[in-house]
Amino acid sequence: MLVETRGNNKLRSSKCSFFEAILNPQASFNGLWSLETIPKIDIKDIQNLSYNDLLKFVFKTIDVDSSLIDKALNSYKNFDNSDMPLNYNKISSSLFIQNLFTGPTRAFKDMAMQPFCSLLCDLSLIENKKYLILTATSGDTGPSTLEAIKNKPNIYGICMYPNNGTSDVQRRQMTTIDAKNIRVIAIDGNFDDAQNTLKTLLSSNEFRNFTTKRGFFISATNSVNFGRIAFQIIYHIHSYLYLLNNGCIKHNETINIIVPSGNFGNALGAFYAKLMGVPINKIIIATNANDVLCEFINKGVYDISSRHLIKTNSPAMDILKSSNIERVLFHLFGDIRTKELMESLEINKKYILNTEELLTIQQYFSAYSFSDNDVLNIIKDYASKNIIIDPHTANGILAYEKNKDVYKNHSTYIKSIVCSTAEWSKFATTISKALGQNLNDKDSIEFICKNYNLELHQNIAKLFNKNETNNIILKKEQIQDYIYSFLDSIKD
Ligand SMILES: *Cc1c(COP(=O)(O)O)cnc(C)c1O
């Protein structure tokens, strides 16, 4: 069962099933759903399982044993290798890269979004309810969500992005989708405007009434939804098995998992894996100039009172409020303390852990942050070894180097897995900049393919030949009416 991170308000049930939490992600006092108890997993039981069998095994241990999961796993068939939705590169005897971007949009979000949205659709069909998914995106969440829900019955999607605020590739991944159940809106403003418009709609009674009257339930596919998180536990367990089965580590030898982090969903998956007993030494959080998570893990202070969002060259990590930290607080310190800390964040825009709590957090996590320049330098450095990494992954590699420096007296360095969260093709302009070129997306891609002998994935290549038909530019004030007329146009 799942329980609420801020305790129960006595107006609803204090526990719910995995499927209920997917459909109604909001818990009491604006909290989140999380596991009531965390099962222990014995490595011997999972060592020889395929990826999908590992997933089903872990889901079974959290009481999710359903043919719907088998069906959801079919979505991994559109990944590069239909038997395994990820792969690995060995960089050195102690550094491995886990490539999590082999799905349709070439970013790690597909790992969870693909099976999750398939599940959401099946649940909506069983319940015979229509769901409206609203997203505001600065780049990667939008494409991944839309790709996962396009043409799915009972699911409707509206996605808002800041006009001129994404890369060409990211925009085209949304605007070239031609599906009756999807509308893409370029908002005349920045990402904050998009996100605020979304929040205003979600909290508006009038909007709720309108959607309810027309038979739509509103749901969310962001990583506050536990359904997405669950799928993100599996690949962290898999990375341990990969190292073990390839003779890179001995039984019970611990590893580090390094995660380029934003909303902390990916890192949270690794945290659950560690709680389940996978021998993980530290989960190392890599952040960019928006280093709020880094400050939190090193000092126990989560303070956004005087911070402003900084635009960096790893935009999917540009975030101030990392929602999923709440689930870490819940598991380590309980619901009463979590509620207290989260209320402090809402009211004072900050909270502070006591010394004992900070030490507990540091048993699980380390964190480092890096500048845009650090990122450009490491991309160039790796390119000279013929390895092309995206700027988010670059932060992860930098964290590996930094951590190795800090612990340089260890005779053998702990084996580390860096999660690679995006394919280079999504952030080609930044990569070509690191290589001394000043080019647009398309020319950067050509430049990189030619000089590094890489082939562009067809899903990215074809974006430049399609028309951007699913695109309308609107002012904030026009969005509500636009959504109303979209919903009115839908015939059952
Ligand atoms: C979403 C995203 C991240 C951040 O992941 P979180 O789970 O939000 O911490 C990092 N890199 C890329 C490329 C992403 O799309």
Image (tube, rainbow, N blue to C red):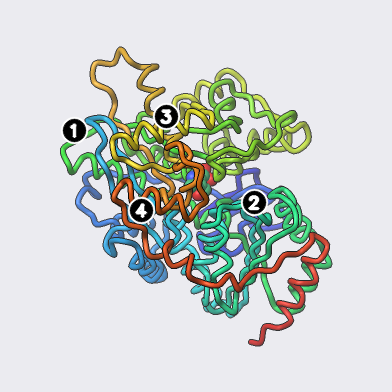
Distance between mark 4 and mark 3 Cα atoms = 31 Å
Q: In the rendering, at what x and y percent does residue 93 appear?
A: 22, 30
Which quadrant is the C terminus positioned in? bottom right
Q: CA distance from mark 2 to mark 4?
A: 39 Å
Tally of numbered discs: 4
x, y percentage for residue 219? 63, 64
Name the residue carrying label 3. Answer: 398
Identity of the amino acid at label 2?
Answer: Gly
Q: Nearer the viewer, mark 1 or mark 4?
A: 1
Q: Determine which quarter of the picture holds residue 80.
A: bottom left
- Which residue does the numbered mark 1 point to in the structure image? 250
Q: Nearer the viewer, mark 2 or mark 1?
A: 2
Residue 265 at least partly seen: no
10 Å neighbourhood of mark 4: few (<14), some, or many (≥20)?
Answer: many
Please name the residue that numbered disc 2 is placed on: 165
Q: Earlier in the sequence, mark 4 or mark 3?
A: 4
Assign a secondary structure to mark 1.
loop
Question: In the rendered structure, are the residues bearing label 2 and label 4 in contact, judged by CB atoms less than 8 Å apart?
Answer: no
Q: Earlier in the sequence, mark 2 or mark 4?
A: 4
User: How many residues crowd mark 3 within 10 Å: few (<14), some (14–19), many (20+)?
Assistant: many
Disc with the residue nearer the chain's start (2 vs 3): 2
Give the residue drawn at x 59%, y 23%: 300
Q: Which mark is residue 58?
A: 4
Amino acid residing under circle 4: Val
Q: CA distance from mark 2 to mark 3?
A: 26 Å
Residue 56 percent location from the top left of the image: 34, 59
Type of amino acid under label 1:
Lys
Q: Residue at x 81, y 61 (%)?
A: 204
